[in-house]
Amino acid sequence: MTILSSSELDGLKHAAAARAVEEVENGMVLGLGSGSTAEIAVQVLAERVAKGLRVQGIPTSAKTAALARRLGVPLTSFAEHHHIDLSIDGADQVERGTMNLIKGLGGDLLREKIVASVSDRMIVAVDETKLVDHLGGNRPLPVEVVSFGWQTVFDHLVAIGCVPRLRLAGDTPFLTDGGNYIVDCTIAEIPDPEMLDANISAIVGVIETGLFIALASKVMVGRPAGVEVIER
């Protein structure tokens, strides 16, 4: 794979996000993801809203909500809608063949998974560097945990083969929008994501893992030659 500059990668992300937004139709309730690629999608969506597109979005983070409000994208909540027609988000890794994902390096994995789980379709927009043969390796697996007793969760993660590290914001623990901690787990390779997800989720104190299994409907991959669409 050719090494691309940061500006070239930004262009690929923009192309993938714009292609994802093409799937949006009038009247939809949308899940609005988090992270740099999802932010691009919100910006492109706002352009369509300004031209008359009627949609409502449920954001997965406070940052996404603020951006959507600033750009004029109407927002709603689960109090009004228990169902989402389409969610658009990025990913930290996409496994070829399965379309399983690792998400959460931005810290919003719980809310992102809630939104994805109640969406009819989830479209993931990435640049080509996010495609991998197997999850893990050079990307840690984020795990959201309660703050009380997080040290005990550490011990259990080590016991099942992870190398955990508490995520920090300066000198203090990073806090999610829900007020929880994130533990980033280094794993050489994840041959069985379903089993690992089940094993981590069974640890008392774990709220959610960054493994998104069988949730993506399509992946829009930004490549120099154009956007590749991968479908389940």
Image (spheres, grey):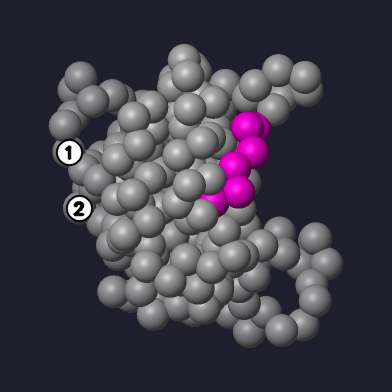
Q: Nearer the viewer, residue 100 or 194?
A: 194
The structure residue drawn at horizontal position 71% and vertical position 18%, both measured from the top left corner, is 172
When the figure is inspected, residue 128 is found, relative to residue 64, above or below; the finding is below
Real-space Cα separation, disc 1 to disc 2, in angstroms:
8 Å
**Quarter of the picture holding the N terminus:** bottom right
From the top left corner, tell me how far across and down residue 109 is, in percent.
Answer: 45, 39
**Residue position for label 2:** 120
SS for dot 1: loop
Asked where in the image residue 165 lies, by quadrant, the reply is: top right
Residue at 39 percent across and 80 percent down: it is: 97
Instruction: Out of 36 and 145, give the one closest to the viewer.
Output: 145
The crowd level at tag 1 (other Cα within 10 Å; few <14, some 14-19, many 20+) is: some
Instruction: Please report the bounds of the magenta region as a residue range.
Output: 162-167
Label 2 near label 1: C-beta < 8 Å?
Answer: yes
Residue located 35% across and 36% down the image: 203
Rendered location of residue 217, percent (x, y): 30, 64
With 152 as the anchor, is 5 left or right in this view?
A: right
Q: Amino acid at mark 2?
A: Asp
Q: Secondary structure at mark 2?
A: strand
User: Main SS type for the magenta part?
Assistant: strand
Residue at horizontal 17%, vertical 38%? 83
The dot on residue 83 is: 1
Give me the disc on residue 124.
Answer: none
Question: Would residue 109 be found to the left or right of residue 24 on screen?
Answer: right
Along the line of sight, which residue is nearer the eye, 41 or 5? 5
Give the x, y percent position of residue 167: 65, 32
Residue type at mark 1 is His
Residue 123 position (above or below residue 52): below
